[in-house]
Amino acid sequence: MSPAGTLQAYGLHGLLLGCVLAGKLARYVHHDHLHLRLEAHRLTARLAFCAFSAHLGHPQRRAGFATYTPRELWAAGTDAWLVWSDPYRCPVVDLAGALEGAAAALLDAGLALEALPVLALWEHVTRHVLRNLHGTVLCRLLRVRALVALGLLAEAVEVTGGLMGAAALPDPTLDSDYVLKDTSGAVVEVSSLAA
């Protein structure tokens, strides 16, 4: 079945929930059976790749995900809150854990090309949805590992340079749900910090 056909058959929430279930199968059920665990991670990679067939703004080949990180999964103008708001439809923390496990296992198995869409989706989730600094850095380190394994050294240097310069990383203070207060106890608006 084509990636677009898979997306049409199961929907975005179905694909993301499938990634979560495959990750949990790999972690809790097939923990001592390496072949089945790898197959569960490969299923996660296939479902993550199919999730990017929502519109043509995303790469349609795995090699196109070398340095690609989406800002959103659906077309511009679609409310991202609908995708991530319901923890029963898409548990985001479990999705990030499943994508992390799949990316690491695929790289350990020498399947760096299959890991690229997983890394792109994982970085999107950790950077834009969870706004997790440590998860984003770990994802980019694994992306560098995948790019080096594929021989894409220029792209690996670009990602490494972005990490060293802390480019496009989520700010754990300003880009979060924390409330900032000044010394008097008044809430500080983010727009006043930018000025």
Image (cartoon, helix red, strand yellow):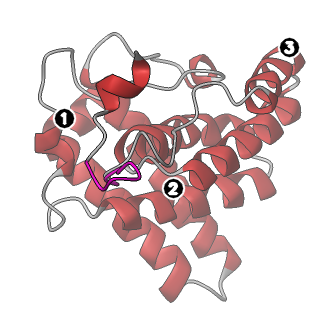
Q: Which residue shows up at 43% across the image and 40% down it?
A: 174
* Inter-mark Cα distance, 1 to 3: 32 Å
Quarter containing the C terminus: top left
For the residue pair 58 and 37, the one nearer the viewer reads as 58
Q: Amino acid at mark 3?
A: Ala
Q: Residues within 10 Å of mark 1 (few under 14, many from 20)?
A: some
Q: Position of residue 116 (x, y in %)?
A: 61, 35
Mark number displayed over residue 80: 1
Q: Dot 1 lies on which element?
A: loop
Q: Which residues are magenta?
A: 178-186
In the rendered structure, find residue 154 and report the number of the disc placed on it.
3
Residue at 21% across / 42% down in the picture?
12
| Residue 86 vertical position relative to residue 173 in the rendered view, above or below | below
Task: From the top left corner, tell me how far across and down residue 186 is, in percent.
Answer: 26, 49
Compared to residue 48, the image places residue 160 above or below, namely above
At 21% from the left and 14% from the top, the residue drawn is 76
The chief SS type of the magenta part is loop
Instruction: Compare marks 1 and 3 and give the one earlier in the sequence.
Output: 1
